[in-house]
Amino acid sequence: MANLKEIRSRITSVQSTRQITNAMKMVSAAKLRKAQDAITKLRPYANKQHEILEHLTESGLDISANPFGENRVPTKVLIVCISSNRGLCGPFNSTVVKKTIDLIQTTYAEQYAKGNVKILNIGKKGGDILSGKGYVPYQRADEIFEDMSFAHVSGYADKMMKLFLNKTYDRIDFVYNRFKNAAVQILQHEQFLPIQSSTDSTKRSHDYIMEPNVENIVNYLVPSSLKTTLYKALIDSFAAEQGSRMTAMHKATDNATQMIRALKLKYNKARQAAITTEILEITAGAEALKG
C-alpha cells in the first residue's frame, strides 16, 4: 500500500505541474499576440528605411562618407547579445549564447586574444549563461525589457552610435532570435555598425525628389534607421521568446498529460495486484481454518 500512496503522490505532483505549464502557455500566447502584432507592423517601416538607403547607394551616394558608414579595420569589437530575462523558453537563450561564443572564437578570435572584444548583454538569462562559461559581459542592459518603447530604446541606440563615432569600437554586431512564427525562431547575426552599403555595384536611377538635399536627408535617415534597427531586433527577440516559451510549455503540458496516464495505469495495476494478493491471503486463511 505504501507503493500506491507514492504513486498517488506523484500523480498529484504532476497534475499540479501540468496546471502551471498550461497557465504559462496561455500567458505566453497572450503576450505573443501583442508582440507579433508589433513586429508585423514595424517590419515594413524598417525594411522601407533600409530600401531607401540601398537605393541611394545604387544611385551613386558614397555611404562610407557618412560617419556611421566609415569602414575601419575591426580591431575593437562590441557584440550585443540579446536574450531574455526569464527562462523556461526551450533553447531560446542557449542558441544565442552559443552563436555569440562562436563569433568570439572564430570570426573575432584575433581581437579576443588581445582583449579587444566586449559583450553588451541584454537579457538576464543570456548574461548568466555567458558568465558561467567564462565570457563575462562588460556591461548588462537587462532593464531594457521593462520599457520597450521606441523612445526608451533610442537612448541605447544613441549610446552605441557614440561608441562607434568616438572609435571606442570599430564594429558593433547584434546576435538575437528573429521571430518567424510561434514554433520557429531564426538565429540572427547582423552588423549594426558601420552601416553596410549595397553589394550591387550597378548604378541605378531611382525616382526620388530630395529636399532640401541628399546630405541632409541621409544625415537624418541613417541615425533614424539605426535606432529602428535596434528597436526591431528587440521586438523580434521578444516575440520569438514568447513563441519559444509557448511552444516549450505546450510540450511540457503534453508530456505531463502522458506521464499522468502512465502513472494512473501503473497505479491501477498496483491496486489490482494488491487486491488480488488480499483475496489470496483471505482464501488461504479460510482454507487453513477449515483444515
Image (cartoon, helix red, strand yellow):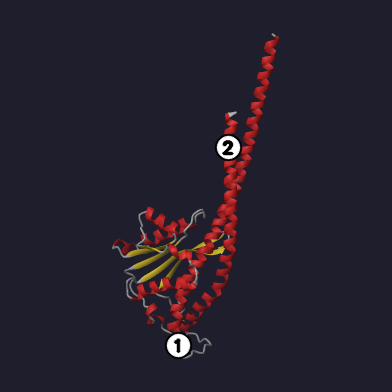
**Three-letter code, disc 2:** Ser
Image location (x, y in percent) of residue 176? 47, 63
| Residue reaching furthest to the top | 291
| Residue reaching furthest to the bottom | 212
Name the mark on residue 284. Answer: none
* 70 and 204: which is toward the camera: 70
Whether residue 188 can be seen here: no
Q: What kind of element bears circle 1? A: helix
| Residue reaching furthest to the left | 114
Whether residue 281 can be seen here: yes
Name the residue located 57 percent from the left edge and 62 percent from the top edge: 32
Instruction: Tell me which numbered mark, 1 or 2, is placed earlier along the sequence.
Output: 2
Q: Residues within 10 Å of mark 1 (few under 14, many from 20)?
A: few
Name the residue located 45 percent from the left edge and 73 percent from the top edge: 154
The quadrant in which the C terminus is found is top right
The quarter of the picture where residue 81 lies is bottom left
Image location (x, y in percent) of residue 25? 58, 55
**Three-letter code, disc 1:** Val
Vertical order, 1 against 81 (above or below) = above
Image location (x, y in percent) of residue 74? 34, 70
The residue pinned by badge 1 equals 214
Give the spatial CA distance, label 1 vs label 2.
Answer: 73 Å
The residue pinned by badge 2 equals 9
Name the residue located 44 percent from the left edge and 60 percent from the top edge: 123
Name the residue located 57 percent from the left edge and 56 percent from the top edge: 246
Q: Marks 1 and 2: which is nearer the front?
A: 2
* 254 and 17: which is toward the camera: 17
Q: Residues within 10 Å of mark 2 (few under 14, many from 20)?
A: few
Vertical order, 164 against 279 (above or below) = below
